[in-house]
Amino acid sequence: MNVIDYQYFETFIFTAIFGVFAIYHILLYIILRYKALLYYCVILIGLTAHFTLYLLLFDADKSFSLLVQNTSLITAMVTTFGFLIFTRNYLAINQYKTPRLNKTYKFLIVATIALTIIHILNIIIAGYNTFSKLLELLAAFTALATMILNIISGIKLFHAEKFNKYYLYSYTPYLLASILYVITWLLSYFFNIKTDCILLITSILITLQIILFSILMGFKFKSIQDENKRIQEEANNRLEYEVDLQTKQLQLAKKELEIQNKELETVNKLKNKLFSLLTHDVRGPLNNVSTLIELIEDKLSDSPLKEITSKLKSDVNDRVSMINTLLDWSYKQLEGVRVHKEQCDLNAIFITIIKEFERAALDKNITIEQEVLCPVIYIDQNMLKVMLRNLLSNAIKFSEYGQKIMFSSKCNSDTIDIIVEDFGTGMQVDWFNSKNEHCPQTKKGTKGEVGTGFGLLITKDFAEMNGGKIICESEINKGTKFTLSFENILPD
């Protein structure tokens, strides 16, 4: 085998090795998606292309040899570019941790790209041979600067991360081969020396580096897997601890809730007993007392005693009304009230409510008039009666002797309005608007009647529960007008 055949065979073998490793690392990147592998593939592709050019030089004519030589700058810059981006990624060089190194790498990356583009444009457009030689020289110095920068970076960041120290170990053959190759190229550029032996040495060193790097990447991925496993185990342990902690907290909360439920049951029983006491043992006897006083009053002639019985009857009626109002409000707050809507006859309801307050109105010589323009409404009848009782009780309470009260209903296009209007002392509208559940305000009536202050609250709540609202219009010493406004709907 002659020298040319041996050199061709030697170059072919190393080119094939580089190509196989390039394909292997591309496939590895596709599987693992690790950027350092992709950047390393750029180096291997550049080397494979560069050594392929040496194969093409054998038995090539002069014009083709010139084309190959021009192309070699491009493949050399691709390899240099790969070195820069790989080292920058592998050693975690960035603007936050290593700003100066990061700027230097960025500068050289831009330089390699710019040299490649300028060289291609020169070949295509101008074709200046002297300029091409100058670009080749600049490319060689750029490659040499890249190798030196990589060595400096490896030394400076030797202890920065666990696997950084292996960068220098595994890249020593590669860096030596690159430096040796660039220096030899520069010497051959200025002096006529043979480079066959140097090419063989660099090829062997590069092959050794590829093997070392493959081993290194295996260890690094094993380390990454171990670290991920450790992080996952820590996360699982932390999650298990938090779940146990929350479980214990839920168990404690459950026990507290059970205790509170038992206490609530006790309170409910006490509340029911209290309501039973108010309903049967207080309200019932008071109604009987009121009836008895009326019978006694009817038997008495005009005398100071009759005036006393009249005052006593008024006080008893006030207390009965107070108990009724408190019971209505308490049931709503503590027991909950369900709305049972039905079609109601307003005329009949007005008559019933007016009859209940007939004697209270008679005591003040108050006339109660009614005007039913809208006779039917779809509403909870019991709630409506409670609302009307409260409004009529207030109207009588704040009306002067001999005045009148108007009960009316009217239909609008989309609402039905029920109106209770008096012409008494009136009230502050903002006083009504400022009423709240925690501190209801009270005001004595024209004859000193007292109340709980809950009547209007109940009326407002019951109106809203039936999809309506209460509107108050009032002027001091001119009277008050309450409007209960509900949707004008009929049952399905």
Image: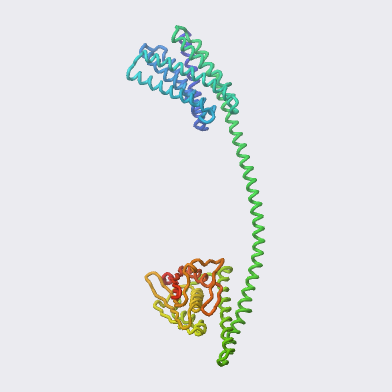
Along the viewing direction, whichever of 424 and 320 lies nearer the viewer? 424
| Left or right, residue 327 beside residue 186 | right
Along the viewing direction, whichever of 435 and 244 lies nearer the viewer? 435
| Left or right, residue 354 beside residue 373 | right
Residue at position x 59%, y 86% in the image: 308
Residue 343 can be seen, yes or no: no
Instruction: Give the farthest residue toward the top.
Output: 192
Image coordinates of residue 388 in percent, x first then y, are: 48, 76
Residue 208 can be seen, yes or no: yes
Image coordinates of residue 398 in percent, x first then y, are: 49, 77
Residue at position x 53%, y 66% in the image: 436
Instruction: Give the farthest residue toward the left.
Output: 125
Image coordinates of residue 76 in percent, x first then y, are: 45, 19
Q: Is residue 360 above or below residue 412?
A: below
Along the viewing direction, whichever of 54 and 409 lies nearer the viewer? 409
Q: Quadrant of residue 61?
A: top left
Image coordinates of residue 348 in percent, x first then y, are: 46, 81
The quarter in which the C terminus is drawn is: bottom left
Q: Quadrant of residue 236?
A: top right
